[in-house]
Image (cartoon, rainbow, N blue to C red):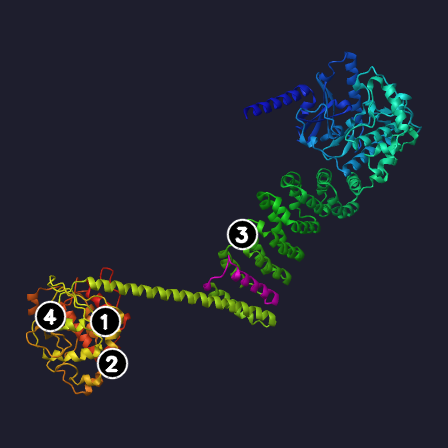
Amino acid sequence: MESMLNKLKSTVTKVTADVTSAVMGNPVTREFDVGRHIASGGNGLAWKIFHGTKKSTKQEVAVFVFDKKLIDKYQKFEKDQIIDSLKRGVQQLTRLRHPRLLTVQHPLEESRDCLAFCTEPVFASLANVLGNWENLPPSISPDIKDYKLYDVETKYGLLQVSEGLSFLHSSVKMVHGNVTPENIILNKSGAWKIMGFDFCISSSNPSEQEPNFPCKEWDPNLPSLCLPNPEYLAPEYILSVSCETASDMYSLGAVIYAVFNKGKPIFEVNKQDIYKSFSRQLDQLSRLGSSSLTSIPEEVREHVKLLLNVTPTVRPDADQMTKIPFFDDVGAVTLQYFDTLFQRDNLQKSQFFKGLPKVLPKLPKRVTVQRVLPCLTSEFVNPDMVPFVLPNVLLIAEECTKEEYVKLILPELGPVFKQQEPVQASNMILLIFLQKMDLLLTKTPPDEIKNSVLPMVYRALEAPSIQIQELCLNIIPTFANLIDYPSMKNALIPRIKNACLQTSSLAVRVNSLVCLGKILEYLDKWFVLDDILPFLQQIPSKEPAVLMGILGIYKCTFTHKKLGITKEQLAGKVLPHLIPLSIENNLNLNQFSSFIAVIKEMLSRLESEHRTKLEQLHMMQEQQRSLEIGNQMNASEETSVTHTGSQIDKVFNNMGTDLLTGGESENKEDGLQNKQRRTKDLTDTLMDNITSLTSLSASTPKLSASSTFTSVPSAGLNMMFSTPIDNTKRNLTNGLNANLGFQTSGFSMPVNPNQNFFSGSSTAGVTTMTLGAAPTLSSYSPLSVPPAAVKQAQQRPADMSALNNLFGPQKPKVSMNQLSQQKPNQWLNQFVPPQGSPGMGSATMGVQANVMGQAAFGMQGNPFFNPQNFAQPPATMTSSSSASNDLKDLFG
């Protein structure tokens, strides 16, 4: 790698040194910067051609340099002859001005080391193109090395040389004297230009007389640079020491032969014995047949044969050559017309540009880029011609690479993008650009798209011409994928919406909706839902085409995989908008059917999605409930319960399947849990056992401060209070012993720890438990009532509001000794633990038993039992420690 870099560095250094040494001190360098060595030309390819730039204007030029070191081997007088010959040629070229002659932009300058002058930009000489690379840099440019002339280039190039000779012979009365490939230069645009007037001969007669061209005898002792190239020289120069305009035509024939034979001349001349060589050449020319010209195209073969004729009078003149059918090629004629374009008026130009798109595909790309494109872009300065020129420029741009487009075409299009005057031409320009918008967006860099291309599209959407708006709306979907999202969202979409709302044209409004529908796929879902769909409700007109456009946008959004409409949008905005539109009187049957089909599809999806959501939600709730029941059952199995011998505990332990579990007793050493299950009807069991309450005598209860209720499923409540009560079981004087009444001080009930509460009457040796009642609970006298009271109890539930005091204000706790001295109501209030206390005593259990008893008489209709009436427990309460939470779990 390092060796390659060193080699490259040495090459660059050598080339720079050569350029510096060649041009150093020459006055040309004051105004021009000299660049790389690109070609060689002139007699003997003695002139090195460099790329140059004018310092003041940055205009591109070609710098021709003759290094005097090339003639160091000659004597001084020979050097002077060579220099004089070179100077004469450049000076003569500078004085002549014609499109077919190389244009000199700075005259010849001489310094101690070199001669130099500047011309129009040059590509190479024809000799370089044909393979003669003498006096070129060591590393020949691939552009020259791989250059291949196309037929149209060859035809038009030879036509240009013929036109140049015609100008010299007819207008200037001059013989060039050295028409060779070395003296034919291809400029940067590919045009063939004549140079090398070192041996030109002007007519000695006045212009009104027949021209006479004095000729000098061939002097073989002169340096080669002081003599023309004999291989392209007419025989009369040498053999008869005469010349005329026909001598140049012979040279033209030899050039045509060389062009079609890879640069090889028709005859090789021995410069040491030139007379003998020309004598042999003259004999061969007299017997020249078509077989010797097989490499030349047939349509020009006879003309070349005439050009190479020994007799000068037989040769066609330059003007005749420009009219031969060989040059009637459509490409050559087109290029010729471009060269004379400046002479045409606008009408002629417009007609030519209209037909040009048919010709451009027939021309090679290099020809269109090098020759046609510069001529077209030069017409952009004429605003009236831009609409005719622009389609051809864009047609060439399609064949260019992105790099060529950015370098050669885009800079010329910049002013055209912004052109707004005259209005008619501006509208035509907008139409043309819109039709080629995909090309512009594909090859134009992003920054230039934002700065030049998209502003033109926005201007088209806001144009007063309905035709331009329609075309713009029709074309936008074709290149929407090439527009960046921020520009589309913030600039393009708002203008489309404005065009739809503000226009008075139905076609523009419909096309706006169609355009939006086609570019929906390039938009974001939420932008469509939040911006596009609400916009549809703002459209004022109700024409069928507009309504179908609205329906189309809704349908596209609804069915698109990436977009879609949420069920909330469907229910709240879309369907309320579509349903009224569906019954517009202007709609026909097919249009109405389209509306209904979309509406039904939306309703179907709405129903499906919402039903699925509710089903999933229900399933989740069921799973959560099952999980809670399982947790409660596990907790109840792990809870250690001590049987206190209370009949009330037995009542609750035997009611339903796990309806209620006993709490933890004062004696934690017992640690037993009573889980008896019965399949017998709960209400019947309660009624059978409730008679045992009549035999219980009131006494001071032994309270268990740690007794608590655990949470039970809500199903237990339904089982406990929904079972109807058999009337035959109610002949127990209201189900309670007449001696047992609800007093505000509570009541005493003997409890046998060994007795099943539902098995019948109580036995001796029972302990007693006092169940407290709420202070607001009404006092009942003996409960013995006629049987009719039983039915009345069924019809009107007893007031259970007393239980609400269980959740009343908290009271301070007192000791057991103080409880016996308080009034009954106070005693009950003190006994009921406040909400959130660690546990609930047996008094609460007594109240629960009271409630259970009332429920047995058909009290389940009481609002107290509605689960909604139970407030959610505080966050600090737990199911294992809060009495109120136990009640909630029990009844909720």
- The percent coordinates of residue 649 (x first, y second) are 15, 71
Mark 3, mark 4: which one is toward the viewer? 4
On screen, residue 673 above or below 790:
above
The residue stretch that appears in magenta: 541-568
Question: In the rendered structure, which amino acid carries the disc numbered 3?
Answer: Asn
Question: In the rendered structure, which amino acid carries the disc numbered 2?
Answer: Pro
Residue 292, quarter of the rendered image: top right
Q: Which residue is mark 1?
A: 657
Residue 547, quarter of the rendered image: bottom right
The quadrant in which the C terminus is found is: bottom left
Q: Which mark is residue 645?
A: 4
Q: Going from the N terminus, do you reach mark 1 or mark 4 first? A: 4
Q: Which residue is mark 3?
A: 490
The secondary element bearing badge 4 is classed as loop
| Mark 4, other Cα within 10 Å: few <14 / some 14–19 / many ≥20 | some
Q: Are marks 4 and 2 in contact (CB under 8 Å)?
A: no
- The percent coordinates of residue 24 (x first, y second) are 67, 19
Q: Is 617 contained in the magenta span? A: no
**Does residue 267 show up?**
yes
Residue 827, quarter of the rendered image: bottom left
**Is 379 on the left-hand or right-hand side of 603?**
right
Q: Going from the N terminus, do you reach mark 3 or mark 4 first? A: 3
On screen, residue 176 above or below 775:
above
On screen, residue 889 above or below 236:
below
Q: Which mark is residue 724?
A: 2
